[in-house]
Image (tube, rainbow, N blue to C red):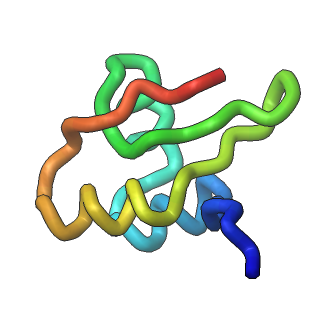
């Protein structure tokens, strides 16, 4: 059984939320948006459960990322 959380790329998370990749970047800069992790110096991945929770909630609050 795989207990690792599923991660989404910026493009996939943006598509699921109905926003642009630039909006996700802006949310990261302001501490809004879903939880994310930085993998290496440039790659950002979003926690799918956090993205879906934000979508359900209908807001941008939430997640300072880890990275």
Q: Return the residue nearer the eye: 65 or 41.
A: 65
Q: Residue at x 42, y 72 (%)?
A: 16
Q: Residue furthest front?
A: 1
Rendered image quadrant of residue 43 = top right
Q: Position of residue 48 (x, y in %)?
A: 50, 64
Give above or below for 62 relative to 51: above
- Position of the C terminus, as image quadrant, is top right
Residue 24 visible in rendering: yes
Residue 8 visible in rendering: no
Q: Position of residue 51 (x, y in %)?
A: 39, 59
Q: Position of residue 4 (x, y in %)?
A: 70, 62
Rendered image quadrant of residue 23 = top left
Q: Residue furthest right?
A: 40
Q: Residue furthest left?
A: 58
Give above or below for 32 relative to 67: below
Q: Residue at x 27, y 37 (%)?
A: 62
């Amino acid at each position: 059984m795989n207990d690792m959380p599923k991660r989404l790329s910026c493009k996939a998370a943006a598509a699921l939320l109905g926003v642009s990749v630039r909006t996700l970047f802006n949310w990261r800069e302001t501490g809004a948006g879903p939880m994310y992790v930085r993998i290496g110096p440039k790659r950002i991945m979003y926690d799918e459960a956090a993205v879906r929770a934000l979508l359900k909630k209908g807001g941008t609050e939430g997640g300072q990322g880890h990275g």
